[in-house]
Amino acid sequence: MALGIFHNLLQLVFIISVAPLVEGVTSRLKENLQSKRGPSIFQPYRDLWKLLRKDEIVSDRSSWIFRATPYVCFAAPIFVALLIPVLTAYPLFFAFMGDMLGGGFILALGGFFATLAAVDTANPYGPMGASRTRMVGFLAEPVFIVVFLTVSFVAGSTIPYIVQQRWVTPLSNFFEPSHVLLLIAFLMLILAEDGRIPVDSPSGLFELAMIDRSKSLEYSGRGAALMRWAGAMKFLVLICIFVNVLVTPWGLAKGTSSLDVLLAAPLVLLKILGFVLVLVYIESSLAKLRLFRITEFLGAALVISIVAMITNLSAI
Amino acid sequence: MMSAQFPILSALDALTGALFLLTAIGILATRQVLASLQLFIAQSLLLTLSAVLLGIALKSPHLFAVAAITICTKTVMIPWILRRTVSAEVYRTREIQRVLNIPSSLLIAAILIIIAHALMSPLVAAVKVPFAQINLPLGLAAMFLGTFTVVARREAVPQLLGLLALENGVFFAGVAIVPSLPVIAELAAAVDVPVVVLVIGLLTRQIRQVVGMTAVGLLASLREE
C-alpha cells in the first residue's frame, strides 16, 4: 500500500515537473515549423522562476476568490492526475477515488474559479474572456458527455485504468470504427478545451480576440506563475488521458517495482512528443476560427461522437 | 460483434465505413466548394477500399472490377469533368447562403444517421454476412446525408456532389449485399454517372453565363421583364 501511494505521488511529480517542458517543446516545434529558431524548450521553467520571484500586486477591490483561484486552479489537475494512468498500467492507490466523470468535474471546478476570478477584478477583458470560455465550455459539454458515455459503455466501466485495456485486447479492437471516431472527437475536444488554434490562439497577445488567456491577465508574480503552470498541467493531464487511455495504452509500467514505474516515464514522454507533433501540425495548418464558427467546429465534434455511439450500439 | 471468420478484414471494413460516413458529413458541412469536391474524391477512395476488402474476403472478382471502375470514374473522371466544365471561380467561392446554417444541418445529420441505423437494425439482425452488417446501415446513412446535402445546399456544384455522395452510399450498401454484381450493371452506372455530371456541369456553366452566379437555390421565381 505504501508503495502504491509512493507511485501515485511519483505520478504527481511527473505531471508537475514535465508540464512546462511539454509547453516549451510545443512552442519550440511550432516556431521551427515556421522556419524560425524559437525559444529554448526550457524557457517556460525560466519564465515560471522569474514570475515566482517577482512581487504580486492584487487589487484591493478584489475579493478572496481572486486570491484563492491560482491555488484552486493549480490543485485541480493534480487531483485528476491521481485518478488517471500516467505511468502505470494498473490502478494505483487513489485510482478508485473517482472515475473519468469525477476527473472532468475537478477540472471544471478549476475552470469555474478562473471564470469567477476574471469577473471579480472588473478588468474589461476578463469578463469578456470568461463569457467566451463558458460559451466554448457549454458547447464542448455534450461532446464530452457522449464521448465518455460511449467509452464507459464499451468498457463496462468508468475507471480509466479499466477502459484502456479494452481497446488493445485483442488488437483488432483498436480499429473499431467507434474507437477511431471517438479519438477524432476527443482530439477536437482537447483543442477546444485548451484554447488551441482552430478555437483560440494560445500565443496571441491581442486582448479582444482572446478566449482562454484573458482570464488570467490581472495576475502578476506568484499568481501569474501558478495560473500559467496550472494551464500547462491541465494540458498535460488532457494529453495523458488521450494518449494513455484512448490511443496507445502501450509502454506503461506493468511491474510493481519503482524501477519499472520510473522506466515508463521516458516511454510516456515519447508518446506525448508524438501527440505534440500532431498538435503542432494541426495548429500550423489551420487558421483560427471566428468566434461564432466555433459552434460549427464543436457541432462537428458532437456529430462525430454521436456516430461513434451509434456505430457502437448497432454492434458493428 | 466482429465476425470470427475475417476479424481483421471486417474491422478494417468497419473503419473504412466510419470514415466514409465522416466524408459524407464533410460534404454536407464544408463551406468551400473545392473542399467538398476533395471530400467526394476521398469518399470514392474509401468506397473503393471497401470493395477491395470485400473482394478479398468473399473471393469475388466482380468486386475488384467494381473497385477498378469506381476509381476510374469517381476519383479521376468526374472530378476532371467538373473542373473542366465549371469555371474556376466557382471553386474559389465560399457558400455563404445555405437553406440551414451549419450547426443545425449537423444536428439533423446526426438524427438522420440514427434513423438510418434504426431502420436497418432488423435487416442487420437478419443477414448473417458480417460485411453486410457493417455496410448496410452506413450506406443508408450516407444516402440520407447525400439527399440532405441536395436539400440544404444552394450552390449547383455542392448539390451535384450531394447527389454523387448519395450514389456512393447506394454502392457502399450494394457491394455488401450482392457480391457477384454483374459487371455490365456496374459499367452502365459508370457510364451514366459521368454523363449526368457532364450535363449538370454544362448546365451550371450556362446558368453562370446567363445569371452570373450558380446559387441555384435563389433561382426559384421568374423575373418579370
Image: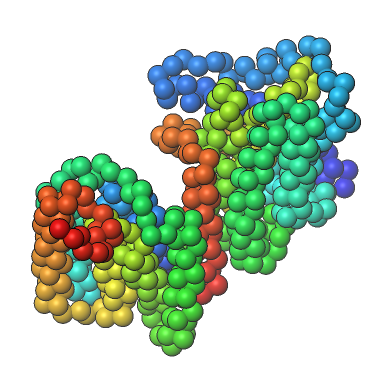
Q: Position of residue A198 (x, y in %)?
A: 49, 39
Residue A155 placement, left or right of B48: right
Q: Position of residue B189 (x, y in %)?
A: 15, 72
Dividing the picture into quadrants, the one containing residue B160 is: bottom left
Which is more toward the observer, B38 or A130? A130
Q: Is residue A215 left or right of residue B33?
A: right
Specify how the rendered protein is coloured.
Answer: rainbow
Q: Which of B109 and A282 is in front in this view?
A: B109
Q: Is residue A142 left or right of residue B77?
A: right
| Quarter of the figure with residue B132 | bottom left
Whether residue A253 is situated above or below residue A100 in the rendered picture: above
Q: Which residue is drawn at 71% across and 54% down?
A: A100
Residue appearing at x 45%, y 71% in the figure? B112
- Viewer-proximal residue, B38 or A89? B38
Instruction: Between residue B207 and residue A307, name the one nearer to us.
Output: B207
Relative image position of residue A16 (x, y in whole percent): 73, 30
Residue A45 x, y percent position in the rendering: 68, 19
Count of marks overlaid on the render: 0
Going 69% across and 58% down the picture, which residue do you hit?
A162
User: Which residue does the image show at 43% across and 35% down from the upper left?
Assistant: A287
- Residue A241 higher or lower than B180, as above or below: above
Is residue B44 visible in the rendered image? The answer is no
Q: A191 above or below B66? A: above
Viewport quadrant of the C terminus of chain B: bottom left
Q: Is residue A79 visible?
A: yes
Q: In this view, does A302 lie to the left or right of B186?
A: right
